[in-house]
Image: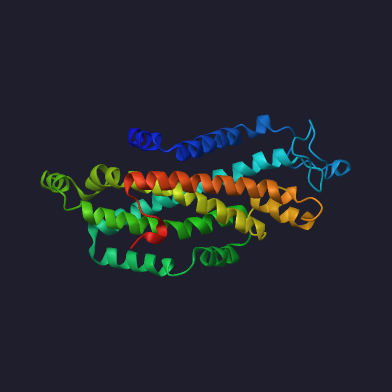
Amino acid sequence: MIASIRTGLRSQKTALVCLGFLLVLFILTILAPWISPHDPIQVNLALKLQPPSLDYPLGTDHLGRCILSRLLHGARVSLGFASLIFISSLGIGLFVGAIAGYIGGLIDFVLMRFCEGVMSFPNLVLILGLVGIFGPGLPQVVLAMMLVQWVYYARMFRGMVISLKERNFITAARISGSSQWKIIRQHIIPNVLPPIVVMGTLEMGWAIMDISALSFLGLGIQPPAPEWGAMIHEGKSFIRSNPELMLYPGIMILLVVVSFNLLGEALSDRFGVKRRFEKE
């Protein structure tokens, strides 16, 4: 799969640039505790709203905190938890979709009707409802997003499994005496996982947008911890005098989401994977 992705991206310079940008950002995110010039939550009112300088490359916010340090640590939240949501949702969707598609019958009917019921509501509405039940906070937001996102993967997995289970190599495995679980684990999952992982590149952008939107509304990460959406919320009171407080995190969200979308488009074209809203 990695060789196919590399081959498909060589001729698409934009996708390569996006991939390079995301890799660099992930590395900076991992190294943030060591490369950040200052403590991202340290308040120093004597230095509030300072312009860029050698000590504070992007200046300081209304509480005298280093904006660059907060952007780097905010990336850890946005990228880290978006990855956690994707991996967890993928795992649940893989399990449910494989069971529904391969076993079929009443199990398939019940699971798919439940998925269709969840998919009939806008994502953000369901997430907001769950966060209202669980209470505000980043762990609650992550849990709510996981509970909503997995149904899309499950439905896609189910369709792929149905198309695969009558193929000759599956029939041969069944005739040889392999159990259902062994067939699902060794033959079904390896064949449906690559296109779903490619689609997950598109989903990462959605996850980052949702996390930032909920933090902007005050339902995600709580002060003083840094996160891009929360930084935009804090900076909105200074939009006239210091618009950079909103501009810097807004640009980061834009660059990351656009990079994931362009990279996902390139990979989906390569593997023929449809977007979420193009699915049956």
List x then y, in percent, for residue 93. 38, 54
Residues 256 and 47: in front is 256
In the image, residue 191 above or below residue 280: above
List x then y, in percent, for residue 216. 66, 57
Task: Count up the numbered dots.
Answer: 0
Q: Report the side of 56 relative to 17 (left or right).
A: right
Q: Residue at coordinates 84% horizontally, 44% vertically from top-left? A: 48
Residue 4 visible in the shown view: yes
List x then y, in percent, for residue 277. 41, 61
Extreme residue in the right direction: 46
Q: Residue at coordinates 80% horizontally, 34% vertically from top-left? A: 53
Q: Quadrant of the C terminus?
A: bottom left
Residues 257 and 81: in front is 257
Residues 174 and 20: in front is 20
Question: How is this picture coloured?
Answer: rainbow
Q: Quadrant of the N terminus?
A: top left
Q: Residue at coordinates 49% horizontally, 63% vertically from top-left? A: 123
Say which quarter of the image contains residue 37: top right
Q: Report the side of 232 relative to 268 (left or right).
A: right
Residue 227 visible in the shown view: no
Residues 240 and 203: in front is 240
List x then y, in percent, for residue 32. 64, 34
